[in-house]
Image (cartoon, rainbow, N blue to C red):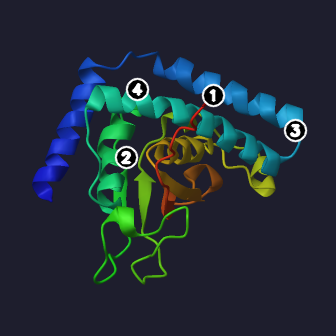
């Protein structure tokens, strides 16, 4: 496990240093901030802004995953625990140059491989009702640099970096994992940590192309 973690870390660092086009960090932060402000002005509803940010992130994630897989040359993860390690040490590192801490749900006894947990057609589960999850703790968040939320945004329940939840959900869906991705806490809202939880809902079956004949 430790060896695998070191390999993932090395891949992430190599991708960031040698295979990632970079932009000015301050410009990146300010551009995202301007997007959030525009959404607030357009919708005047923080719950709707959260939804729009997640939706935007989802669309980004569905496209980003192809580039990520092509550059990293990673194969299929053995289980959802490894998914969490790859997301943190390779995904976040290669795109944002950060490595969130990862905590995992306890693996159920006698659990089967990830592909046998459940399927979109209602296939057999391993008898366990609790789906696996992992939580990412962001010690730093490039999206939130120089940001301080006004009281009305705090009261309205704004999750400023909710685009990240969408990116993760979209990317994982493209590799046949339906997930539920939510912020648990955010230092911008006065919490001690910024934490995102990713819970596996079900494993999706490969879609078979429809025959045109």
Measured in 3D between alpha carbons, the distance from the residue under mark 1 to the one under mark 3, in whole angstroms, is 17 Å
Measured in 3D between alpha carbons, the distance from the residue under mark 1 to the one under mark 2, in whole angstroms, is 21 Å
Q: Which sits earlier in the primary sequence, circle 1 or circle 4?
A: 1
Q: Which sits earlier in the primary sequence, circle 1 or circle 2?
A: 1
Q: Are marks 1 and 3 in contact (CB under 8 Å)?
A: no
Q: Neighbour class for label 4 at 10 Å: few (<14), some, many (≥20)? A: few
The residue beneath circle 3 is 43
The residue beneath circle 1 is 32
Q: Secondary structure at mark 3?
A: helix
Label 2 vs label 4, nearer the camera: 4
Q: Which sits earlier in the primary sequence, circle 4 or circle 3?
A: 3
Q: Residue 47, percent across and down?
A: 79, 51
Label 4 vs label 3, nearer the camera: 4
The disc label shown at residue 87, or none: 2
Q: Which sits earlier in the primary sequence, circle 3 or circle 2?
A: 3
Quadrant of the image containing the N terminus: bottom left
Q: Neighbour class for label 3 at 10 Å: few (<14), some, many (≥20)? A: few
């Amino acid at each position: 496990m430790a060896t695998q973690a070191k390999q993932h870390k090395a891949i992430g660092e190599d991708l960031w240093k040698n295979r990632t086009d970079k932009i000015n960090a301050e410009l990146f932060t300010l551009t995202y901030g301007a997007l959030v402000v525009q959404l607030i002005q357009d919708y005047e509803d923080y719950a709707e802004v959260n939804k729009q940010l997640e939706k935007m992130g989802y669309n980004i994630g569905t496209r980003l995953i192809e580039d990520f897989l092509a550059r990293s040359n990673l194969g299929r993860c053995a289980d959802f625990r490894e998914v969490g390690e790859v997301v943190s040490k390779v995904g976040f590192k290669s795109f944002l140059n950060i490595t969130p801490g990862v905590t995992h749900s306890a693996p159920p006894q006698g659990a089967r491989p990830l592909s046998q947990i459940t399927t979109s057609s209602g296939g057999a589960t391993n008898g366990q009702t609790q789906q696996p999850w992992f939580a990412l703790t962001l010690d730093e968040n490039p999206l939130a640099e120089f940001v301080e939320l006004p009281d009305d945004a705090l009261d309205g329940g704004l999750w400023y970096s909710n685009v990240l939840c969408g990116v993760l959900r979209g990317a994982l869906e493209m590799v046949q994992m339906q997930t539920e991705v939510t912020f648990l806490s955010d230092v911008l809202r006065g919490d001690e940590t910024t934490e995102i939880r990713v819970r596996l809902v079900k494993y999706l079956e490969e879609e078979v192309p429809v025959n045109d004949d």
